[in-house]
Image (cartoon, rainbow, N blue to C red):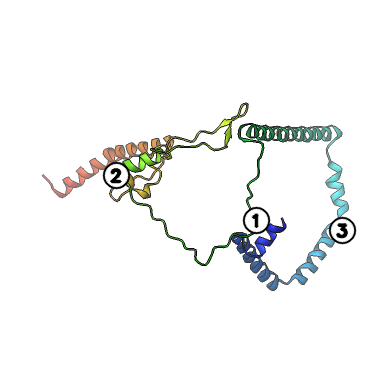
Amino acid sequence: WLRVLTNIIVWEECYISFWIAIMSFILSAVVFFVPWGFLLQWTLRIIAWVAFGPWMKLVDMFYYSRQDTDEQKRERVNKRQKRLDEQKLEAQIARERASKLRDFKQYMFGEHICRVNVLKKDRYYDLPLPSSSATLYNPKSKSLGELAMQEAGYHRNRVNGQQLVGRMIPKIYETPITEAPTGKPTKKTDLLEKGSPAAFYDGNDSYIAAAIKVGSIIVGAGAITWFGVPLFVYLVRLVLPE
């Protein structure tokens, strides 16, 4: 954690450092303009007057004297204990599943397992050289067939990762054959050539959404036919009398 703190201070973790700096500026402005002495004094006075006055005897008479009976207290304690036991059981099951998943990964992929750090904990920084350069990557536009074949894995060998699925006997998660989601011809429609028929369709509607759209179209067409057409005929007869 000392390395993480150092990386935040020296802005290696730029996102975290940025938000800490912004929040520090905001809090400094709030602390500078708020009269903390006045607020603290009157807050303590109100607490002392409200919570430690003689009228607390009334609170004891009308509130605490009407507490639950022993049977109600025992029932409430049993409910709390039952809920606590359920939480303990869920936590135990989660620990057992995590332990089994770790053992299966060691059995399938080897004994050496390391955790990938979310925050930077590197001891040495990788600084680019002065002679380093970067070039913007602009992928070429493709036709619908070429892009669909590429996303389907044509002339490309897929190697499944180490993600396991399943409860009783975990198995390796098999990567889908195509990258395109259901209802779309391709996933990366921005790589299609201009004028491609699939470039104009960028939706991924579910069955319910598609049914709602089709139903709304049918209802709208029926309403126009039932109300709009007679009204249009009536207006035409008024403008062009026989």
Q: Position of residue 24 (x, y in %)?
A: 66, 66
The disc labelled 2 sits on which kind of residue? Pro
Q: Residue at x 44, y 37 (%)?
A: 157
State the residue position of label 1. Answer: 122
Answer few, some or many: residues within 10 Å of disc 1's Cα (few below 14, many 20 plus, some between 14 and 19). Answer: few
Position of the C terminus by quadrant: top left
Which badge, 3 or 2, is on the more N-terminal residue? 3
Q: Is residue 9 above or below residue 90?
A: below
Check residue 193 in the rendering and tell me which mark sits there, or answer none. none
Instruction: Return the disc, 1 or 2, that comes first in the chain's sequence.
Output: 1
Q: Nearer the viewer, residue 184 or 231?
A: 184
Q: Position of residue 106 (x, y in %)?
A: 65, 34
Task: Give the amino acid type for the residue marked by disc 1 in the picture.
Answer: Asp
Q: CA distance from mark 1 to mark 2?
A: 48 Å
Q: For numbered disc 1, what is the local secondary structure?
A: loop
Instruction: Say which of 198 and 224 sits in front.
Output: 198
Q: Nearer the viewer, mark 3 or mark 2?
A: 2
Labelled disc at residue 197: 2
The structure residue drawn at horizontal position 83% and vertical position 38%, both measured from the top left corner, is: 68
**Observer-nearest of 66 and 165:** 165
Q: Which mark is residue 52?
A: 3
Badge 2: how crowded within 10 Å, few (<14), some, or many (20+)? few
Instruction: Give left or right: position of 52 versus 143.
Output: right
112 or 55: which is nearer to us?
Answer: 112
